[in-house]
Image (cartoon, rainbow, N blue to C red):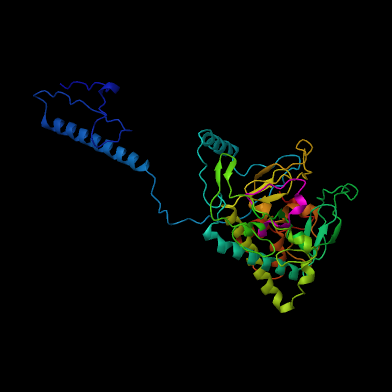
Amino acid sequence: MFHHMPAVSPSSWNPSYKGICPCVCAVVCKTPQISAPSSDNLRLKLQFGLERLKKRELTISETIFCASQRPRQNPSIRKEKPIPQNVDFPPILPKKKKKPFPIPFKKIQKAAREDKKLAQMGIEKPLEPPKNGLLVPDLIPLAYEVLDAWKVLIKGVAQLLHTIPVYGCSECSEVHVALEGHQIKDCLGPTSRDRHSLHSWVRGSIDDILVPIESYHLYDPFGRRIKHETRFEYDRIPAVVELCIQAGVDIPEYPSRRRMKPIRMIGKKVIDRGGFLEEPKPWRLGNPSSPVDFDTYRANERFPPPLSEDIPRIAQETMDAYDFVRSGVMKLMKKYTVKACGYCSEVHVGPWGHNAKFCGAFKHQWRDGKHGWQDAIVDEVFPPNCVWHVRDPRGPPLRSALKRFYGKAPAVVEVCMQAGAQVPDRYKPMMRLDIIVPESDEAKLVA
């Protein structure tokens, strides 16, 4: 007679069984004692069953082992992210709140603790170009290209505005590119209640398309800080131009100090900056009304209206210049420090912000008018200034009832598109080109 197989307990498992994954416990079965009179057929069946059990354990362990390993990807091959069908509009930040930090606050605290620890030990802070005052040679050609594209962008927008009508609200910052202003009730101006939130449209200019974000020009970014009493002793130029100057562009009207030896710092204190040099007088003092080709001042007067057959070509060149300036500024900001106020639109290009007290944003009384400096993002240096996308510029004006069916686009993109330029694919999801705008009476039936 056969003896019954005993139940296998966890203590009888053998984890050192070779060929089986550690995550799968091997089941060790005791071979039953077969009496002499038992037949050979029963013995063969029992051995066959044990062999099938061992094969099944090996198959399961190999499957689990293979599934736990991720397939290796070639690092040289980068998968392109698919362009979404539609995206949300850029969020409107509340004015009664500080802007969010672009870098997580815990990382800022961690870096500060490390700098403080090195300072307590008397160890100099390791600095690399351009943090040590030296230029990055690889970014100098890019800075010149960005400045040239910036000039092309100003010239192209100024020429297109002679043929493409642009309107701006006299009470708020809303801009519209069409033959007439829209009728969307979203004005937040001081007298918007009297107009039932409708906008008060006036003829727009190039400053409505390219928002003028200016910064102080510094002869030595690592020199003396700008004080509130000395703020008029420095020129104000576009922040994009100042970023290009500090990245290696030489402009005779706005000279900049080029160091040959790096600065040295312990913590937040500069122990060796090569001495202070006498800064040149501001160029604007001697030429208060002289226009320059990299500023939007009187750009509509400097550039005449284009010929009708040249409008599509100018529009495409302006669109390409806009994309290049934006991508170039993004690359330069990865190396060169740009600060922005967390409460207002003030931008400063340099390792630390200035001390001028003219911030009038939320709770400025608590800060005595000083700015709350933090790291800037690209939209603060080169704002897109999104406007409503108009599919038919000669059609009826946009209405509030159909507001959720309309899309938006950067103001430069909208102007160039209406002038005949091809829109890049990355702007199409926000323009919502695949959404059919219904009639006003059909909008109520849409879920």
The image quadrant that residue 424 belongs to is bottom right
Residue shown at the point (70%, 41%) measured from the top left: 372
Residue lying farthest to the left in this orientation: 36
Is 322 left, or right, of 194 in this rendering? left
**Camera-side residue: 271 or 46?**
271
For the N terminus, the quadrant is top left
**Camera-side residue: 20 or 332?**
332
Would residue 9 be visible to someone looking at this image? no
403 is higher (above) or lower (below) than 122: below
Q: Where does the image place residue 322, in percent across and percent down from the top left? A: 65, 63
Q: Where does the image place residue 438, in percent across and percent down from the top left? A: 74, 57
Q: Is residue 118 magenta?
A: no
Q: Where does the image place residue 276, in percent across and percent down from the top left? A: 64, 50
**Camera-side residue: 187 or 239?**
239
Would residue 157 be visible to someone looking at this image? yes
Q: Which range of residues does the magenta coloring cover?
A: 221-241
Q: Is residue 233 magenta?
A: yes
The image quadrant that residue 153 belongs to is bottom right
